[in-house]
Image (tube, helix red, strand yellow):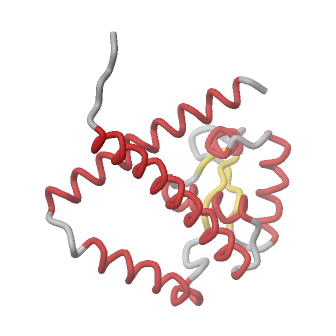
Amino acid sequence: MSTDISEHRKNLLEALVWAGRETSNAAVMYHTAMSGLLGLGPSEWKTLDLLQRHGPLTAGELAQHTGLAPASVSGLVDRLEAKELVRRVRDTKDRRRTIVEFVPDTFAGSAHVFEPLLNGLAQLHAEYTDEQLELILGYLTRAAAVQRAATAELESLR
């Protein structure tokens, strides 16, 4: 069974792959620059992002989200705790469990460094209708799920 697609669609799909790669590279470079500016390693920076978005997590949950080995997560949490960016707390439901939580107002004094990106994205978003934003959101959400699945597949090859 052959799948014939138009030349236009073929070109669009190719451009979409390239735009995705450009977006990925831009995100990696932004987060590398931001983590460096804040005196953090990239893994530290992304771990703080995970804790901000997901709320408190156990070390095991952090290992699942980051793909890091449990020993690496322990060292990572130690470094973040030493910088007073996270704290370890006992789980109130299971005292044997330790939960890592983001320290509120960690970046309160450096919020201005986020403004160029946030303002630029706000201007970009203003150019789209609600329906277009819903389409973009759906695509990005599904593309992230595809990327997480591909990451899990790579991890299984180790």
Q: x and y percent of residue 44 in the render?
A: 72, 62
Q: Which residue is most to the top?
A: 1
Which residue occupies 53% across, 31% down?
A: 149
Pinpoint residue 32: horizontal percent, then vertical percent: 68, 69
Q: Quadrant of residue 19?
A: bottom left
Q: Who is closer to the viewer here, 132 or 90?
A: 132
Q: Residue at x 64, y 68 (%)?
A: 29
Horizontal side of 134 relative to 59 (left or right) equals left
The outermost residue toward the front is 7
For the C terminus, the image quarter is: top right
Q: Residue at x 75, y 72 (%)?
A: 40
Q: Nearest the camera: 154 or 100?
A: 154
Residue 127 versus residue 90 in the image, above or below: below
In percent of width and height, residue 73 lies at 78, 48
Q: Residue at x 29, y 31 (%)?
A: 5
**Horizontal side, residue 140 vs residue 112: left or right:** left
- Quadrant of residue 69 within the rendered picture: top right
How many marks overall? 0
Quadrant where the image shows the N terminus: top left
Indicate whether 101 appears above or below 99: below
Q: Is residue 1 left or right of residue 98?
A: left
In the image, taking residue 104 as reference, residue 85 lies left or right, namely right
Q: Is residue 98 above or below residue 109?
A: above
Question: Is 67 situated above or below 90?
Answer: above
- Pinpoint residue 147: horizontal percent, then vertical percent: 52, 39
